[in-house]
Image (cartoon, grey):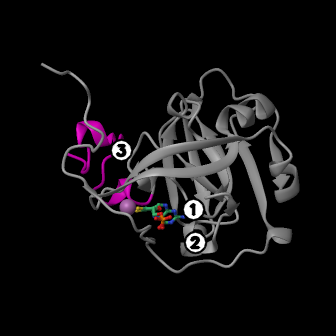
Amino acid sequence: MSSKKPRLPPGQRLTRRFPILQAGNIPKIQIKDWRLKIHGEVEKPLTLTYDELISLPSSRITCDIHCVTSWSKFDTVWEGVPFKEIIKLVQPRPNVKFVIFECADLGGQFTTNVPLDVLLDEDALLAYKYDDKPLETAHGGPVRGLVPKRYFYKSAKWIIGLKFVIEDEPGYWEMRGYSNTADPWKEERYSR
Ligand SMILES: Nc1nc2c(c(=O)[nH]1)N[C@H]1C(S)=C(S)[C@@H](COP(=O)(O)O)O[C@H]1N2
Ligand SMILES: [Mo]
């Protein structure tokens, strides 16, 4: 008997395409105008330009992604700054438990919330390349969050802010019936 974990989470279908999904319109952000404001409960708040971000230590990872609408895509290749590097720079206060990803779309109203411990994993990135090319606008460029261990709505496109918080703040989809924890392996699609 094999106890090997299947590669496709429960209820998912494999796609070879890369669907483009967002709640509103795709915002246009010029790299020269892009800023990432890192704030909240941190010792050293910081605003990064694109050049400053890409000069930080980076990693290139291959991972599978899983959308709550039930498509999964295997072996996606990303490059970006591991979230851990951001933590080193800003030094969250000891009681910080969540990070709110703040995005440029929906007039700045799209957010998603991720527990800090999930972002300590090596595969949690601020991604600026996909398939070894600059991240396309449609997929969240210049920079998006990548949190492959959660459904893909936790991977925020067009990020412009990271807010470190003590109390959880459910984001756009999390307030609209989707799971706050969003673990594809437990099939946590909807909130109860
Ligand atoms: N800023 C922002 N990020 C977002 C979304 C969004 O509407 N706005 N949608 C989420 C959802 S539901 C999914 S499935 C993925 C889709 O990413 P993709 O278009 O690169 O496939 O982005 C996530 N991140
Ligand atoms: Mo999604």
Q: Main secondary structure of the magenta part?
A: loop
Q: Earlier in the sequence, mark 1 or mark 2?
A: 2
Task: Check disc 2 and report the residue beneath it.
Answer: 105
Q: Position of residue 122 (x, y in %)?
A: 59, 31
Q: Please, what is the three-letter code of the amino acid marked with disc 1?
A: Lys
Disc 2 is placed on an element classified as loop
Whether disc 1's CB lies below 8 Å from ligand 1 is answered yes
Q: Position of residue 55 (x, y in %)?
A: 86, 46
The quadrant in which the C terminus is found is top left
Residue in view at x 52 percent, y 57 percent = 111
Q: Nearer the viewer, mark 1 or mark 2?
A: 1
Q: Earlier in the sequence, mark 3 or mark 2?
A: 2
Judged left or right of residue 37, residue 188 is left
Mark 1 touching mark 2, by CB under 8 A?
A: yes
Disc 1 is placed on an element classified as loop
Residue in view at x 56 percent, y 67 percent = 139
Task: Check disc 1 and report the residue beneath it.
Answer: 157
Residue in view at x 87 percent, y 50 percent = 52
141 is higher (above) or lower (below) than 26:
above
Judged left or right of residue 117, residue 175 is left
Disc 3 is placed on an element classified as loop
Q: Picture quarter containing residue 165?
A: top right
Q: Which residues are magenta?
A: 172-192
Q: Position of residue 84 (x, y in %)?
A: 68, 31
User: Between 23 and 68, which is closer to the camera in this rendering?
Assistant: 68
187 is higher (above) or lower (below) than 51:
above
Q: Please, what is the three-letter code of the amino acid marked with disc 2?
A: Asp
Distance between the alpha carbons at the discs numbered 3 and 2: 20 Å
